[in-house]
Amino acid sequence: MAATHPASMPRRRFLQLSGLSGLSLFWNRWLQADSSQTPSPRAKARSVILIFNAGAPSHIDLWDPKPDAPDKIRGEFKPIATNVPGIQISELLPRLARQAHRLAIVRTVHHRQTQHNPGMYWSIVGKPYPIDSTLINPTRNDLPSFGTLVGWLARRDGYSGALPPYVITPAPHCDSTAYITPGQFGGCLGARFDPYVLHSDPNAANFKAPNIGLIDGVDPERFAHRRDLLDRIDSPLSLPTFNVPTEFDLNRQRAFQLASAREVSEAFDLNREPAALRDRYGRHSWGQSHLLARRLIEAGVRFVTTVNGPSIVWDTHKDNFNLMKKKLVPPMEQAFAALLDDLHDRGLLDSTLVIWMGDFGRTPIINKDVGRDHWPQCYTMVLAGGGIRGGVVYGVSDKHAAYPKDLPVTPADIHATVFAALGYDPHGIFYHDAEQRPHPLSEGQPLSALFS
């Protein structure tokens, strides 16, 4: 009989089948050994920037044009040639057409959930949420996103920077502010692995990252005195039996770091950038968030998500073509193209993996309101940098961009590719959920053809 890998069944069931409770020692040592793997020294990527378009942009109007399809499918936009022979993308993306040599365009991503929050969850976690409903919110039982896991791996490997290893700007994934997407926080890994969420517009004239740096009137000496006083007040409670840090302790320690470390406030200070460079990114929330992402990566942060929102702004059920042409695509494309150029100019593109994605795609058939509806059955994600081969298209959709025709890809496959680019074996490192069941970093398969 074929042996069953321990990670494929719950711990209790494994021990029941073995008939030997003492094998729990084997189980724990096996997991510890697997979790202690270090990144491959040959990996090129050190950090990740995720550009997330909340609300789901139309793949057929951007990355996967179908000029020979009927009018009710192909839409208003024409394809244009890129600087890579044979690759065409939408006329809405002229700047990125000139950077196609850096892009891996994956045209056959698919999953099964049709609502925004579960769609975002599947895209960033790589697994389906238990229900296909937008009316959900984060809990401590959630499985973690790949951003959360990159932060977890960084801390596991000794990351001790004052900046959090995972940052989201300018606001979290959400479907309205009442329903925040699960998975993007620490979830089952705990509060220690929550990202720092900016909750502020980097394009504002008076922009200052909340809870970063000392308040007016408190200099470093006075701050140190206050912290020492607080430690003295708490010291009688520090009994030997209570030496495990609580969520409160961890959050307070992180707050001290954010408030007192000079490198933290400097990393968030966009005024240190030349005005001309800020103009290149675009004087809008998306552009300045992308510039901030570059600054944070340069300062040592391992994963930055820039949410091109607010909320589900890309949800173009009505007037899809005017919204994309006049409102949505220009700032997104300007910021994305500037980020790639800036990372390249600073020698950071080889070590920074940039990913562009949304919750899902949009229907090939244009609806009665001249819009496109939700469509998870086939859509596009784009990767660049971090050791990924540029100038390639991975996968072919059918003649209407409705279903994968060749090389279907899941979000989990994208995640496995990200972990592999960072040097981690996506199937060889495990974390535990709230019920102490082990999960690999990703259940997908790395897209090995994309590695240069």
Image (cartoon, rainbow, N blue to C red):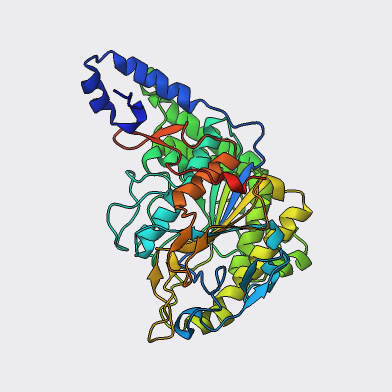
Picture layout, residue 301 above or below residue 62 = above
Q: Residue at x 45, y 59 (%)?
A: 173
Among the 4 quarters of the image, the one containing residue 209: bottom right
Q: Considering depth in this image, is 225 or 449 the residue closer to the camera?
A: 449
Among the 4 quarters of the image, the one containing residue 176: bottom left
Q: Tell me the quadrant of the picture where the N terminus can be found.
A: top left
Q: Residue at x 46, y 55 (%)?
A: 408
Residue 419: x and y, percent?
A: 54, 41
Q: Considering depth in this image, is 150 or 216 the residue closer to the camera?
A: 150
Q: How many marks?
A: 0
Residue 9 visible in rendering: yes
Residue 199 appears left or right of 139: right
Q: Residue at x 34, y 65 (%)?
A: 115
Residue 431 appears left or right of 199: left
Q: Considering depth in this image, is 259 or 142 the residue closer to the camera?
A: 142
Picture layout, residue 289 above or below residue 213 = below
Residue 154 appears left or right of 297: left
Residue 166: x and y, percent?
A: 54, 46
Residue 240: x and y, percent?
A: 39, 18
Residue 214 visible in rendering: no
Q: Tell me the quadrant of the picture where the C terminus can be found.
A: top right
Q: Considering depth in this image, is 24 or 109 the residue closer to the camera?
A: 109
Residue 382: x and y, percent?
A: 58, 59
